Amino acid sequence: MASEDLAGALAAVLGGQGLRVQNCDSGPAGEPPAPVRLRKNVCYVVLAVFLNEQDEVLLIQEAKRECRGSWYLPAGRMEPGETIVEALQREVKEEAGLHCEPVTLLLVEERGPSWIRFVFLARPTGGILKTSKEADAESLQAAWYPRISLPTPLRAHDILHLVELAAQYRQQARHPLILPQELPCSVVCQRLVTTFTNVQTVWVLVGTVGMPHLPITACGFTPMEQRGGIKVAVLRLLQECLTLHNLAVETKGLLGLQHLGKEHTDGICLNVLVTVAFRNPGIQDEPPKVLGENYSWWKVMEGDLQTQLLQKLQESSVVPLNR
């Protein structure tokens, strides 16, 4: 991949688009990562936040025995064969009676690569709000409540932060509209846009095995990687090519999300923005030395790309990735 091809790939990722996952540059020690399967070794959850013009939130009343009668946002586990958007639309229809479309990804939460939740801001497009007369195993009913006066009991208070995040986004969007890109992937992995900056200059770490490319790290399912979360895979790749003890590494957030879910491709690829900086900058104005021959630093010369990268870094214009 020549410099112009790298520039095109970076532009696509910065724009929230996807790129096919061909190979992984880093993987867990031992065997290559096995393909992931919903209901077997991964669980993906979708959750929707709806806010109407009256600043009301759509909530559903739970029917499950362990939390029956409590209130929560429409949410549920993805099923094999679904795209992320299809799963979101199915859960909202089953629990709230409404048809919907996602507006943007708001947040991705993880408890290691085996449990990931996708939180969306969404809007209704039709359907009829579910009442207590339609109560079933999915929910008892759905209703709109003022954002500042939610009903009790709530199934869990984690939704309070999600509702506020949606309200803040509607008031002032911190990142562009991001929706899942439907591209197949067999593993849980991350494509890294790893940056080093100095004043107005930006370097990006690229993989050099084969054609130069944005490197991809596969997440493992060992107890250590489960406990440490998906950031472990980021640090593993960087450890292979940089001396990390004198560097500060930070995952800023998501630039995009890729998943298909068809034909047994249950994997996902998170396109992630990462920063690398010297702990004691001193007079260091060049990126840290790369170890080995599998990676190198690419100095971004294209003005538009440089501006986009600096803006995203300075304004944290990315989808949050929380553990």
Image (spheres, rainbow, N blue to C red):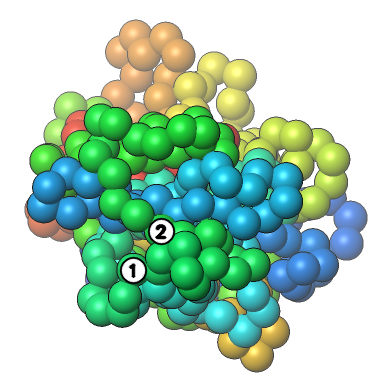
Name the residue rendered at 57%, 52% in the picture: 62
Q: Which residue is mark 2?
A: 142
Residue 15 falls left or right of residue 96: left
State the SS at label 1. Answer: loop
Q: Which residue is mark 1?
A: 129
Residue type at the position of mark 1: Leu
Q: Residue furthest bottom?
A: 263
Query: Separation of disc 2 and disc 1 at Cα?
Result: 6 Å
Q: Quadrant of residue 18?
A: bottom left
Q: Which mark is residue 213?
A: none
31 and 140: which is toward the camera: 140
Q: Return the x and y of residue 146 as percentages of the image width and height.
A: 24, 39
Circle 2/circle 1 CB separation < 8 Å: yes
For residue 226, above or below residue 197? below
Q: Is residue 60 above or below residue 281?
A: below
Residue at image x 47%, y 69%?
Answer: 133
SS type, badge 2:
strand
